[in-house]
Amino acid sequence: MIIATSIVLILSSLLMVVLVLMHKGKGGGLSDMFGGGISTSLGGSSVVERNLDRLTVAVGLVWFASIIVLGLLFKGDGTP
């Protein structure tokens, strides 16, 4: 159970990094300092962006749940 949950945590962590990097910058952040805010948005979000948002939230919930499960499976001293 611990190994399976650890594998889910690792996979969801990697997928979360990829999904967050795929998001379009909204402006006003650190990327604007380096020329990332030059492009203009035409307003509204497309279906692809909304689906990407939903997928990111779902993977985030799986990531969070796997951390909670691992925390419950381990005792306070770090042993299962």
Image (cartoon, grey):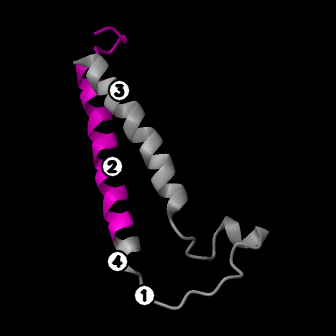
Which element carries disc 1, helix, strand or loop? Answer: loop
Pick whichever of labels 1 and 2 is earlier in the sequence.
Answer: 1
Alpha-carbon span between mark 3 and mark 2: 14 Å
Q: Nearer the viewer, mark 4 or mark 1?
A: 4
Q: Which mark is residue 59?
A: 2
Residue 28 coordinates in the image, percent (x, y): 63, 76
Q: Which residue is mark 3?
A: 7
Query: Mark 3 touching mark 2, by CB under 8 A?
Result: no
Alpha-carbon span between mark 4 and mark 1: 10 Å
Neighbours of disc 1 within 10 Å: few (<14), some (14-19), many (20+): few
Q: Nearer the viewer, mark 4 or mark 2?
A: 4
Q: Is residue 19 left or right of residue 36?
A: left
Q: Which residue is mark 1?
A: 44
> What residue is rendered at 68% in x and 65% in y?
30
Mark 2: amino acid: Val
When asked about the image quadrant of residue 46, the answer is bottom left
Alpha-carbon span between mark 4 and mark 2: 18 Å
> What residue is rendered at 43% in x and 45% in y?
15
Q: Is residue 35 left or right of residue 46?
A: right
Which element carries disc 3, helix, strand or loop? Answer: helix
Alpha-carbon span between mark 1 and mark 2: 24 Å
Pick whichever of labels 3 and 1 is earlier in the sequence.
Answer: 3
Q: Which residues are magenta?
A: 51-80
Q: Which mark is residue 47?
A: 4
Mark 3: amino acid: Ile
Most distant residue in the bottom direction: 42
- Where is 44 relative to 70, above or below? below
